[in-house]
Amino acid sequence: MPGHVKKGYARPLDLKQGRVDMSHGGGGRAMVQLITDLFAKYLGNEYLAQGNDGTCLPAGAGRLVVSTDSHVVSPLFFPGGDIGCLSVHGTVNDVAVMGARPLYLTAGFILEEGFPLADLARICESMARAASDAGVKLVAGDTKVVEQGKGDGLFITTTGIGFLPEGLSLSGDQALPGDAVLVSGTLGDHGMAIMSKRENLSFDAPILSDTAALNGLTEAMLASVAAIRVMRDPTRGGLAATLNEIAHQSGVGIHLEESAIPVRPEVEAACELLGLDPLNIANEGKLIAICAAEDAQRLLATMRAHPLGAQAAVIGQVVADPNAFVQMRTQFGGRRMVDWLSGEQLPRIC
Amino acid sequence: MKYVTEFRDGGVAQGLARAIAAEVRPDRRYNFMEFCGGHTHAISRYGVPDLLPPNVRMIHGPGCPVCVLPIGRIDLAIRLALDNGVILCTYADTLRVPASDGLSLMRAKARGGDIRMVYAVTDALKIARDHPEREVVFFAIGFETTTPPTAVAIKLARDQGLGNFSVLCCHVLTPSAIMNILESPEVRDLGVVPLDGFIGPAHVSTVIGSRPYAFFAEEYRKPVVIAGFEPLDVMQAILMLVRQVNDGRAVVENEFTRAVTEQGNEKAQDLVSEVFELRRSFEWRGLGEVPYSALRIREGFAAFDAERRYGLAYKPVPDNKACDCGAILRGVKGPTDCKLFGTVCTPENPMGSCMVSSEGACAAHYTYGRYKDASVLEAGA
């Protein structure tokens, strides 16, 4: 008489001592187990549970905004965060500073053979927390495994999807002479947190990465109906790169006041030690906004009322300049340009 | 940031600016050369020229260690990495200096050379300890400031029996370069470069002291003021130079007394002379062959000398013909006098060495000062 086929025993994933091996990317049972016992455990939701090759999502109101970002930060765990929350924040922020409301994320994981499963679990847990705090859901994912020596532990690529209300348009080409330039807080924290970890620099107060999801702050700012023309998050290349991009896109110049730019003393000290300029250093939880001068104080007050904008400041203004130069009056009383960084000062910062 | 921001105080700077403006004579010009790249960088980054009267001009000198490295020296380092398969350790700025065959150390790295950026020579020692199966070469560049640490590293390598570590020594000497400038026909005979005085090096002088400059003051009648690298140091030094010029004095004065003594750091000097000896001649970019202007590793430490170890033969390579780095390093020309400046030569694609390091005259002007060229153009148009 035909009996039931016995269910084969599957050894549970060893989340304490286990490591990623090639079979975890092979498309077989081991891969399914990694997805169900690790990824789904932390990141699962009704969309991932559909279990199909693609995910069907309800559309939000307005236009679709999409942004994608790969994360190769080294070290994977750094003061103030890790690659997991960073991969959520980075992409959420790119969608948020467009003025859109981020709702969905996808994530691609490239794992190196031998990567500890315990670290992967920690990272997924951190992603889950970051996504839940930011109010976004991970709706699709992919895992690949490369041989030892062909990767560096773990790379994560995330794509964010959000919806932009009708009538709202923020773009880097909309800055106008006379506009005010605002920043949401201290500059250079993320880059110097990574550098101080890599270089074993220690300070009385350790430098923590500012990695954070900015969509709460951007929503508050947009609700203040100040005439915001541009928002952008100054990640790689720092404030200098971001302002130069905007100046070129809009065909305007920007004049900054060095004394108004917030920088933590420990970040300034670390920069001094390593010969770096805080204006070139990456941030992962800051934004810059350009708005009509008459709205600047109202926008500033709104930003300061939000925990992620408590140290916001007006740092300069947009001027007419066909050369699209970003200039700064130094605290010393002179004037200089704030140029793009040349070369690669801090590789693998995000 | 205690003990740093005090030297960048805008209020004090305004006071010094007023003092300088009050002391300069309207009927004459004051041309001062800051020898060091560190001063060049501070002057550009803090906008010091904006606080100076129009008849006080700063001329950038050759004291940028990366800028004065000739192509042939970079070529040697590249060959070590690509042909000899060594791990080549170097300071960051050196990576981008253009060399022969369209290469730089950074491009050689992309072609498979194991070239690593280090912050200090001790990092290179650690790499040698961690990779006993590999040969590790430290590409040692710089003036008297970076020489003592290299000497320490060589002695440590010997004491610890690190047989896989060696140094490609390109250390150069400040006084020989100043002498070369003062002896150049443009300064001495033609008066193309009117030089009324020098701002003397900060960190270099902590090692060699203020004494070596006395000769320039006496023999060439040029005032020298040794100054720290903070912008207020530079302003104070300019004021002291203006006063010397006005009084017709030419002596060595020390603005940087918080770090520089007359004798310098004798311990460091002893270390350097234990490990290094003078080279008969060394090629500088911009200055050409300068006699007794650089150091080589003594016979006793030959095992740690990459030149001896790998039988390297130096081959001079001429600079790009259109590149004015040579004239710029001698103060004969300014960055904007060069046809390549800001066109084909930019910090992203440097043709000459002055565009590479942030201490180089061209890179400093490109990064911090080129808005001034635009206003000149607009005013002229």
Image: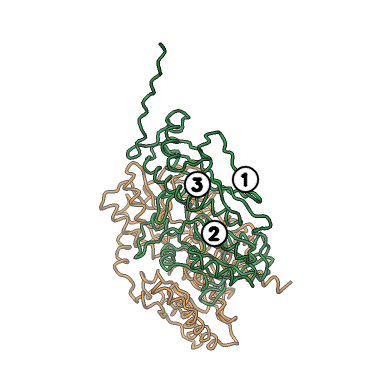
Chain colours: A green, B orange
Tell me where residue A132 appears, x and y as whole percent.
48, 50
Chain letter belonging to callout 2 = A
Mark 3 nearby-residue class (10 Å; few <14, some 14–19, many ≥20): some
Q: Which residue has dot 2 on it?
A: A234
Amino acid residing under circle 3: Ala
Q: Is residue A97 above or below residue A185?
A: above
Residue A277 visible from this viewpoint: no
Quick one: A120 or B41, which is closer to the camera?
A: A120
In the displayed image of the protein, which residue is found farthest to the front?
A1
Please, is residue A123 above or below residue A300 in the view? above
Query: Alpha-carbon distance for marks 1 and 2?
Result: 29 Å
Tell me whether marks 1 and 3 sit on the same chain: no
Q: Chain of mark 1?
A: A
Label 1 and label 2 in one chain: yes
Chain of the residue under label 3:
B
Secondary structure of the residue carrying tag 2 is loop
Q: Position of residue A12 (x, y in %)?
A: 36, 33
Q: Residue flagged by tag 2: what amino acid is it?
A: Pro
Q: Is residue B48 left or right of residue B166?
A: right
Measured from the top left, where is residue B357 in percent x and y? 51, 61
Element at badge 1?
loop
Q: How many marks?
A: 3
Which residue bears the numbered disc 3? B108
The answer as to whether the residues below labels 2 and 3 share one chain is: no
